[in-house]
Image (cartoon, rainbow, N blue to C red):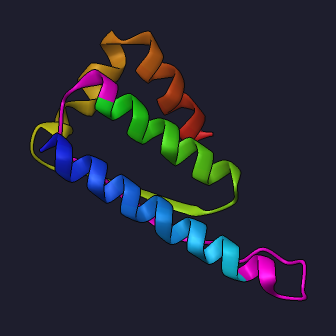
């Protein structure tokens, strides 16, 4: 499952990178927002932390971010309450 999450994150990152590279070549200086969907299917702390960090980065770049919780990922709320690092990343997303 970790491989699937990693591959999905890489694909979404590459999609965002390609979109940015294409808009960089345009003569206009306006940035086009990208919609990003993140699927969290694990209850592994490090995997979730990296997914939330990626979501925060994307939000800071003014992209639209949606997070979907599947399988063991639905435990995110209880994990955020127990882990200060996850709590910090989750707080950044909600603001």
Residue drawn at x 19%, y 52% as measured from the top left = 4
Report the label total. Answer: 0
Specify whether 85 is left or right of 17.
left
Compared to residue 53, the image places residue 16 above or below, namely below
Residue drawn at x 71%, y 77% as measured from the top left = 32
Residue sitting nearer the eye, 95 or 35: 35
Percent across and percent down for residue 72 are: 11, 37
Compared to residue 48, the image places residue 13 above or below, namely below
Q: Quadrant of the N terminus?
A: top left
Q: Is residue 40 magenta?
A: yes
Residue 91 visible from this viewpoint: yes
Residue drawn at x 50%, y 47% as measured from the top left = 55
Residues drawn in magenta: 23-46
Q: Quadrant of residue 21?
A: bottom right
Specify whether 41 is left or right of 87.
left
Q: Quadrant of the C terminus?
A: top right
Compared to residue 19, the image places residue 60 above or below, namely above
**Extreme residue toward the bottom, this view:** 27
Percent across and percent down for residue 10 are: 39, 56
Percent across and percent down for residue 14 are: 48, 65
Q: Is residue 53 magenta?
A: no
Specify whether 61 is left or right of 45.
right
Specify whether 35 is left or right of 51.
right
Residue 41 visible from this viewpoint: no
Residue drawn at x 78%, y 76% as measured from the top left = 24
């Amino acid at each position: 499952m970790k491989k699937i999450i990693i591959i999905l994150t890489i694909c979404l990152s590459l999609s965002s990178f390609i979109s940015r590279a294409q808009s960089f070549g345009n003569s206009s200086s306006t940035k086009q927002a990208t919609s990003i969907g993140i699927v969290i299917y694990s209850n592994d702390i490090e995997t979730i932390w990296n997914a939330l960090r990626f979501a925060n980065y994307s939000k800071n770049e003014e992209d639209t971010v949606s997070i979907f919780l599947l399988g063991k990922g639905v435990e995110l709320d209880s994990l955020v309450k127990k882990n200060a690092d996850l709590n910090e990343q989750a707080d950044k997303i909600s603001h």
